[in-house]
Amino acid sequence: MCLIVLAWRSRPGLPLAVAANRDEWRDRPAETAHWWPDHPELLAGRDLQAGGTWMGVTRNSRFAAVTNFRDPAERRTTAKSRGALVTEFLLGSDSPARYLSNLAARSRDYNGFNLILGDGEMLFYYGSREGVPRAIEPGVHGLSNHTLDEPWPKVLRGNRAMEAALESKDPEPALFDMLSDAQGVSDEALPNTGVGIEWERRLASPLITGADYGTRASTVLTVGASGEAKFEERTRAADGSVSGVASHRFSLVACAWLLLGAVSMAHAQGSPFADHVCVRNLEKWVSFRDPDSVKVVSVSEGKPEVIDYANTRLVAVKFTVMVNSKNSQGGYTRPKAYECHTSEDRQRVLNYSPRND
């Protein structure tokens, strides 16, 4: 992929929307998006040269996509195929955070890359140039051949188009319009990635045309809160016209997308948090002037992240706990935020600390 624009938890009822263009040499053989016969749970295109893929989704809510990090000076012909990272995650069982934590030690086996991974509950980004996994915050984000949200013209254009598309009941037509945009930009707005001015101009638009290299496929993926998904891939000819369409509608069998709606509803209705691991262990980690007056106002959804713990780095889950308690005058002040890290299975508290806003 050379452009990925996504909306993560940006609109009620639509946890995920992705619009992406795959740019590649036209003589590199590939299959269009299909359910793989050898892995029936996987929907993706297939690179017939190296065997991997550039973007895919599985029936159990796993999503992955990759872009190259553009730096011709560091390109190695002996490096492993980056598309293998996508299929490795999609066909595996590790959480995004755990997979990326393990990947960091071998990322140099590949030429520069950016990887976006999700499991229906969390969405993570890893760039080999940065070398640190990070959770993607809710909102609209863009990725090309630099780091996430680098303000290249095509990224900014894609983000604006995504924000506008989310105003429509069905964002797909507007997203394909954005992916079909072949308008260039001024030389002053171009990045300098080491490929020369002629290639910088050619690569600046979302849609790239040409007989030798260009946009091979445009894809839009949308996932609803109840787990219904639509994946449409449009194959592009050398002039940018659509030469084929592969459209798939299916339901995700895992309940992660349903859980998002359930969690939001529970918070809206003021559901108690007494059974939450961070609440059960609150007074073991935090002291209060009047423990009997403690009120837990809210507990955020957990966000996996890598932390230092007991002289090692491990995957934890971070919760923000909003707590109110009486002061020395016997009155309540405004709630105070605490960060609670738990084990990856969310069964054990690792640390607790006040959040300094």
Image (cartoon, helix red, strand yellow):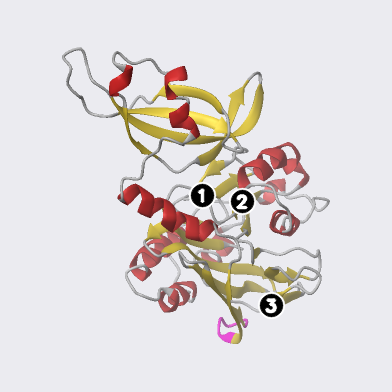
Name the residue beneath numbered marker 1: 148
User: From this viewpoint, which residue is outermost toward the right?
Assistant: 78
Residue 56 is left or right of residue 142, and the answer is: right
In what element is the residue under mark 3? Answer: strand
- Give the residue type that dot 3 points to: Thr
Q: Is residue 241 one of those drawn in magenta?
A: yes
Q: Which of marks 1 and 3 is nearer the N terminus?
A: 3
Where residue 114 is drawn, which disc sits there?
Answer: 2
Which residue corresponds to the image point at 38% horizontal and 15% vertical from the top-left?
Answer: 287
Q: Is the magenta stretch mostly helix, strand or loop?
A: loop
- The residue that disc 3 covers is 32
Q: How crowded is mark 2: few (under 14 residues within 10 Å), some or many (20 or more)?
A: many
Is the N terminus in the top left, top right, bottom left or bottom right quadrant? Answer: bottom right
Q: Residue 168 — which label?
A: none
Crowding at dot 1, Cα within 10 Å, few <14 / some 14-19 / many 20+, comes out as many
In the image, residue 98 lies at what x, y percent? 66, 41
Residue 130 is situated, as x and y percent measured from the top left of the image, at: 59, 39
Tell me the kind of residue under disc 1: Leu
Q: How far apart are marks 2 and 1 (CA)?
A: 8 Å
User: Bounds of the magenta span?
Assistant: 237-242
Whether pointer 1 and pointer 3 mark residues with C-beta atoms closer than 8 Å, the reply is no
